[in-house]
Amino acid sequence: MRRIASGWNGIGRAWPNAIVCFAAAATHAAPATPPHLDHIVVIILENRSDDQVRTLPTIASLIASGSVFTQSYAVSHPSLPNYLALWSGSTLGVTSNTCPPPGSPFTAENLGHACEAAGVTWRAYSENLPAAGSSVCSADGSLYTRKHAPWTDFANLDHANERPYSDLALDIATGNLPNLAFVVPNNCNNSHDCSPSRSDSWLASQVPPLLAALGPNGVLVITYDEDDGKADNHILTLLVGAPVRAGYEVAERIDHYGILRLLCDGLGLAPFGAAADQAPVLQVWANSTGAHALTWTRVKTIYR
């Protein structure tokens, strides 16, 4: 807080600044509990470290308008264990991209089963998925690969919710965006086989209609499955949406289990697996409940 000068004139000049500082601090107080969200859309990109992508034009713009986790880390290599961690709170002993993974189909708790049990709608939209609910390991020259679709490996969820990417635009147009949507770009658009700039251009074209569809109580999450093997699995994770603080950096460490905790809290689901051991994410949420109406009498009381 700026020091207030003595005397009437000094106080008169200081009060406007004091009001601004006080209001800003109060407004940005973290809520006691995470907000319940109407929609969460998760976009998963591939195999890039935080420092490779955070300055790309689209991602940089999203960071500026939302909150970014500066200490976000994947939990494993290669891809599939990370997807399983984000979906089920465990790597389930999987250490490779073998399709189908050893031990599957799994019956552990996961976001699909938890949503269905709670009456929460979910869908996964994958580019180049040949048909709804398809269990193929790859398609279209490996533009689609099942290792990026962990829901396919579970027996306790409705596989009809696994949709080709074209269904996302239809669901948005008809007002049927589910409460939870996972979006999986193909292996060029997710930067697995193509450049990070190609992925950034894909985001530039695909994110605006998603943000418009989220409404006033929805959040977009963008994260990566893992880094390129050169940065201690340090990845980019960001949040954008009306409930999210703009231009905010979170310095606390988070991993895929922490992101899963955020998803569970936002959807009103009991956290499961390793997510149950994670602290709730609180500081990213814009919160006006902590702001107090300032009257002239209150200002004079606070700063007298």
Image (tube, rainbow, N blue to C red):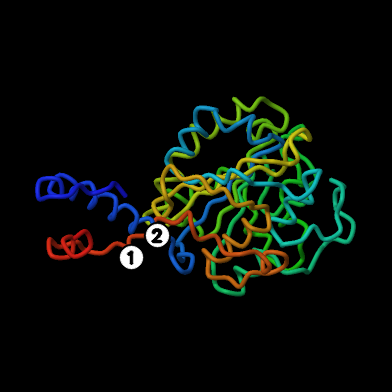
What secondary structure is found at the residue carrying circle 1? loop
* Residue type at numbered disc 1: Thr
Residue drawn at x 63%, y 39% is 185
Front-most of residues 102 and 155: 102
Q: Quadrant of the C terminus?
A: bottom left
Label disc, if present, on residue 29 of the rendered structure: 2
User: Residue 152 location in percent, x, y?
Assistant: 74, 56
Classify 226 as above or below 111: above
Q: Is residue 300 left or right of residue 159?
A: left
Choose mark 1 or mark 2, whichever is in front: 2
Q: Is residue 156 left or right of residue 65?
A: right
Label disc, if present, on residue 39 of the rendered structure: none
Residue drawn at x 74%, y 41% is 233
How crowded is the residue under tag 1: few (<14 C-alpha within 10 Å), some, or many (20+)? Answer: few
Front-most of residues 92 and 118: 92
First in sequence: mark 1 vs mark 2: 2
Classify 98 as above or below 122: above
User: Residue 71 location in percent, x, y?
Assistant: 63, 45
Residue 50, image quadrant: top right
Q: Is residue 263 left or right of residue 283?
A: right
| Residue furthest to the right | 102
Q: Is residue 282 left or right of residue 114?
A: left
Are the residues tagged 1 and 2 within 8 Å (C-beta)?
Answer: yes
* Residue type at numbered disc 2: Ala
Front-most of residues 138 and 53: 53
Residue drawn at x 72%, y 36% is 47
User: Residue 234 location in percent, x, y?
Assistant: 69, 41
Question: Marks 1 and 2, how far apart in space?
Answer: 8 Å
Residue drawn at x 12%, y 50% is 7
User: Residue 210 location in percent, x, y?
Assistant: 46, 45
What secondary structure is found at the residue carrying circle 2? loop
Label disc, if present, on residue 289 of the rendered structure: 1
